[in-house]
Amino acid sequence: MTAPSAVKAALTSQAIETPSWAYGNSGTRFKVFAQPGVPRDPREKLDDAAQVHRHTGVAPTVALHIPWDRVDDYAALARHADDLGLRLGAINANVFQDDDYKLGSVCHPEAAVRRKALDHLFECVDIMDATGSRDLKLWFSDGTNYPGQDDIRARQDRLAEALTAVYERLGDDQRILLEYKFFEPAFYTTDVPDWGTAYAHCLKLGPKAQVVVDTGHHAPGTNIEFIVALLLREGKLGGFDFNSRFYADDDLMVGAADPFQLFRIMYEVVRGGGLDPAAGVAFMLDQCHNIEPKVPAIIRSVMNVQEATAKALLVDRDALAAAQASGDVLGANAALMDAFSTDVRPLLAEVRADAGLDPDPVAAYHRSGWAEKITEERKGGQQAGWGA
Amino acid sequence: MTAPSAVKAALTSQAIETPSWAYGNSGTRFKVFAQPGVPRDPREKLDDAAQVHRHTGVAPTVALHIPWDRVDDYAALARHADDLGLRLGAINANVFQDDDYKLGSVCHPEAAVRRKALDHLFECVDIMDATGSRDLKLWFSDGTNYPGQDDIRARQDRLAEALTAVYERLGDDQRILLEYKFFEPAFYTTDVPDWGTAYAHCLKLGPKAQVVVDTGHHAPGTNIEFIVALLLREGKLGGFDFNSRFYADDDLMVGAADPFQLFRIMYEVVRGGGLDPAAGVAFMLDQCHNIEPKVPAIIRSVMNVQEATAKALLVDRDALAAAQASGDVLGANAALMDAFSTDVRPLLAEVRADAGLDPDPVAAYHRSGWAEKITEERKGGQQAGWGA
Amino acid sequence: MTAPSAVKAALTSQAIETPSWAYGNSGTRFKVFAQPGVPRDPREKLDDAAQVHRHTGVAPTVALHIPWDRVDDYAALARHADDLGLRLGAINANVFQDDDYKLGSVCHPEAAVRRKALDHLFECVDIMDATGSRDLKLWFSDGTNYPGQDDIRARQDRLAEALTAVYERLGDDQRILLEYKFFEPAFYTTDVPDWGTAYAHCLKLGPKAQVVVDTGHHAPGTNIEFIVALLLREGKLGGFDFNSRFYADDDLMVGAADPFQLFRIMYEVVRGGGLDPAAGVAFMLDQCHNIEPKVPAIIRSVMNVQEATAKALLVDRDALAAAQASGDVLGANAALMDAFSTDVRPLLAEVRADAGLDPDPVAAYHRSGWAEKITEERKGGQQAGWGA
Amino acid sequence: MTAPSAVKAALTSQAIETPSWAYGNSGTRFKVFAQPGVPRDPREKLDDAAQVHRHTGVAPTVALHIPWDRVDDYAALARHADDLGLRLGAINANVFQDDDYKLGSVCHPEAAVRRKALDHLFECVDIMDATGSRDLKLWFSDGTNYPGQDDIRARQDRLAEALTAVYERLGDDQRILLEYKFFEPAFYTTDVPDWGTAYAHCLKLGPKAQVVVDTGHHAPGTNIEFIVALLLREGKLGGFDFNSRFYADDDLMVGAADPFQLFRIMYEVVRGGGLDPAAGVAFMLDQCHNIEPKVPAIIRSVMNVQEATAKALLVDRDALAAAQASGDVLGANAALMDAFSTDVRPLLAEVRADAGLDPDPVAAYHRSGWAEKITEERKGGQQAGWGA
């Protein structure tokens, strides 16, 4: 069993990246409900992110989304982050919201559209150079809606070509994180629909290409922790986009739908050495707070990842290994469940107190007056949102 | 086996309602791609619908969506339809796009919001009185995203109260068509998630409340034709919202994803007497043509329903019944598959020719110049779309 | 918030029925792995069940399965149960393991087979009369494998006829518990595939017909607690067949796959008054311990239900209701999650100690020597199994 | 568009392998229904297979399953096949039906069990040497039922070790076909659950290791033709196990559940060059005829594959490519659907007549008297079945 001090140390050093877009408005295809106090520009998103880090202590970086977070001076944005005690994290490319991308971006049948998409990816690498970001997160909404609409294999060829071009453009300390998604917004084929496709491309690209696991991007019933274990074994797990889902890519708060699954995922991370910062696994949130207030929802999400991590660290691995080796099915299961059944909130309260934080981040946030302040101050202007 | 003349007669008399919103822009939460020539108001939507009816001969009615199709003078709109050889069909209520509906409409925890939603439903009945529509189609996006968010049972009570109020407001020849949906936009609970819930409410309301089956609104693997057979047996099948899906509520063209399923559904309709106009089963489309041109996509969809219907009518029911009665599994399956394997396009071409129509509606549409005409004429103004 | 004493009282009075067949061998279609010490007759099954009750104190009844538990003298079997501190519980009919049932039982196209199946159901009621059982649990494996194989609607007519005949045969204090199942062993249609179908039949039958929810019998993604809430609201929830699943009807130990779901289900039971014995909700296990030792697996399953129930009882319902009423999404969710995050094992240890039981039932069982005893004594003879 | 003569030639040269076990009894975990006339040994299975080939002309090889088809003299069995105009096909290993395999075979925690399983795999290669079989088909039922039961990553290590040992044992013209399966009989993890896992192992093994796609082994909603296209692009598609499913691994007749999907799969095979015998793609059936007579069901299945292949060959690929290149979504879809809507039964009747076969294989089989003959002759003895 991991020593309590080691558990605490691991929890203290964990870093969870929050995404700039989660601070803005979002919704479903039916309706985007606006919320008071929502940021109107990237600086205000960082201001909100700083509140999350202030109360949790483990959310020091913020992912950007281009063009949603496009600014004239990225160095200035990085300085603003620094002033807030934050750093800029992964750069997320967006090649799905231009009218030209109706039939795809880097997989589009027309070379001109592919070129446009590729130029955007190059721009993102330029931005990484300016922000000092390590990771280029690539999610392609490319796919088709109808059988026959386009040639599945030719689209793979185009995808490989674009990925290769971007890979060659990467600096020594930069990575591609390639995301896969089961479906949506394409409804017949998706060009990177599963971990196998992402893995096959990353393998050919080389060591700077890694797979990112979005916990909401799988077919019903998929065993995600199995994929995590495999990718860690292959040295190909670049990171997570955390969120939770009951049905499809619901983008709910991580841990809200199936906390036991989140625990099992974090256990495989721990078991596979992925919690060691040297492993390079990025722990990111990717969520949409459609109906709940955004900042406290993100605080809660960060806490949910912490709780799952704490439980994973508490697994008595010696007892587990002994039960596994002897074929003791119930004993092995019980060893895992003992950790899951533990209430780790007191432990995390202690970790926070040790770090000079309020043991209850949500309560502290509510007391801080931040919600009232932004509701008051952020009037006028255009709220940030998925399309903004 | 149904006599060829009876098959033709049934195909000639079939009526498929097209939805006004399918003529406008639509998309996913990620992007709505605008298309040239898209209507800018309800009259232009009817103009497009008239083209569908002109070339197929079986799409004489158009469903309206309130408030998207709200006009000052519904009688004038009905006259415009009449001038085009059309009639106004089902009125679809919309209680999901107002900011007040963030946590629900008729199931909302606050009485004031519920009242607002109910007033909208009453307005829809008023519109039905003006348009002469028979059907009020009710789809509630009501639900919750997080466990605990609201009380499941209390929401059912509120739902029942609203439905009762609307039911009592109906005229003698008016009906409620209650739609169910597995999920989206709510991601934890949906207040009418399955046919059983819709059925239970309709049963209590009375004979003027019927269930509508949207073919895209089921859990993975659900046997939809079974539900159709059951609802027909119970006298509770009010109609269909046709579309097709590979994953969730993809809203693709009906018949595009699984033409065999569509055939099986239509077979149960035929077998259960649902093709008889007296049965009151409304055959409606409910689709989103996100990336394909809308008018020809709707023409194609109508044709897909016709083809499935034709195949269903061609089933040799005597042979089928004999094989079923004798436990001849392969023989019974073969009897059904024989009809499905038949190429019914020549038969439908004949039916169209008999009706004075071009045997190839899609080609006729393309030759008609309508696409070019609306692209040219419908410039400026605000295109209709899901939120418009 | 429920007072601690009331929580303890509720936990003490909870009764969880274990199924005789879970003590026998089971497996998949690929292999049944035999285990040492497995019972060879119904009396030995009861002996094992007595161990579960001895260590948990909340498993006083045992469900029988006919013909697997057919004996000459049911009164003698009931006396054996009584000697062990047990009672005989629900009678489970089996109309799926005779060669005649290849194409169905009560829905079979041939009247003779339907009659044979009905006679078996009557026999089960006779056995209930002898054992004093209240519940006749009916699960029909009836269905079809191929489209066209049989007439969906005619099969419903046959089903209704059989159910009516059995209903009329029931005594005043006897009930039908009608079970639904998504699929398996039929792979195209299942004649009672969902709660809606079961509900519709039970409604027509009358108050002595109730729906039973097997937690493994739903389409992927189905919200089971919603169904529970609805059935309680309708007064039609007869009971549960508890187990858990990751994919299909996996029949794993309840709580093993998704303990949060089990908690949500038990919360709806509590909220809907279903924990009150007067509500008549039967809490039954229906599991297959294919690879793990059976008696401790059942003990563990009983404990898992207890833990979920304890957490459900600990929900601060006043706080929850207040948050719900005010539309506080995060607050309401947090109220529910607070209870789930609580480690209830100390509370249950206390409840057991209060009842004179060992606080750790699994450890007590292992110390008891029962496993060694039955391994030694139950040699020779035919082990009980699914087909035995 | 492919010339008619080329279409016919391709259909004539197609070879579909039938599995010996499909001629024996099979069932679900609930019941195996015995059928009259079922073979009692491998020679009788070949006799039945010869009937399938006799009437279809495209089923010249038969897959064996070891130990179900273990004989003393494989050369004699091969001669019997030869006398019947057949050849022995793939050897299917079975490491799931021995009591030792309760917790796995090559992934088992105990080295002794792994060694036993590996010895069986070596035996299968020995049999291939004797029968002249090219393919060793490996399906591992290995997995776990409960979280924690065993170490996911360690099991991968064990799997890789066993595969490497077998790979090294292969002759120059022998291959491993590695099968993946979503779930069953393991219900929490499966050690080869998806194409990505199989692909990753095959890639490391080398060119003689290929992935086999069982059409029933995927998560709900998985786009199988996409996987087919990818594996062909990677040169890693070793073959198919054809069957069809509505829910899980239902093992129904191929083409019975979704003939459009089968067509799309065959289209990707054609498009990717997989129909060329030089591509080495094995077209095998893997089905369970639980309730329907086996020989005619297999004939029908072979015909279903032929019909899908014929439709795939009829796609006007020039028209399709032109529509795809120009972004004509509806035109491209229509090009594909035109082929699917075609009734190819007359074409196949012609192909058969050209080959001197009866144009209607099912009718010819029924007229042949084979069913009556085997029912009469195969009395006594032990029928072959899944466990036999």
Image (spheres, coloured by chain):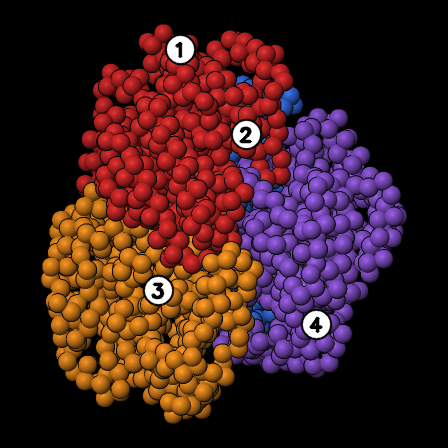
Chain colours: A red, B purple, C blue, D orange
SS state under label 4:
loop
**The label number, if any, that marks residue D272 in the structure image:** 3
The residue to which callout 2 is attached is A388
**The label number, if any, that marks residue B358 in the structure image:** 4
Q: What separation in Å lies between label 2 and label 3 (alpha carbons)?
A: 41 Å
Q: In the depicted view, which residue is nearer to us: C325 or B46? A: B46
Instruction: Using the image, determine if residue A165 lies above or below residue A158.
Output: above
Picture quarter with the C terminus of chain A: top right
Q: What separation in Å lies between label 4 and label 1 (alpha carbons)?
A: 71 Å
Q: Is residue D196 visible?
A: yes
SS state under label 2:
loop
Disc 3 residue type (three-letter): Gly
SS state under label 1:
helix
Neighbours of disc 4 within 10 Å: few (<14), some (14-19), many (20+): many
Horizontal side of residue A324 vs C162, given as left or right = left
- Residue at x-position 24% and y-position 80%: D87
Please check whether the numbered discs 4 and 1 fall on a single chain. Answer: no
Dot 4: chain letter:
B
Neighbours of disc 2 within 10 Å: few (<14), some (14-19), many (20+): some
The x, y position of residue C222, in whole percent, is: 53, 45
**The label number, if any, that marks residue A83 in the structure image:** 1
In the figure, residue D210 lies in which quadrant?
A: bottom left
Disc 1 residue type (three-letter): Asp
Please check whether the numbered discs 4 and 3 fall on a single chain. Answer: no
Please check whether the numbered discs 2 and 4 fall on a single chain. Answer: no
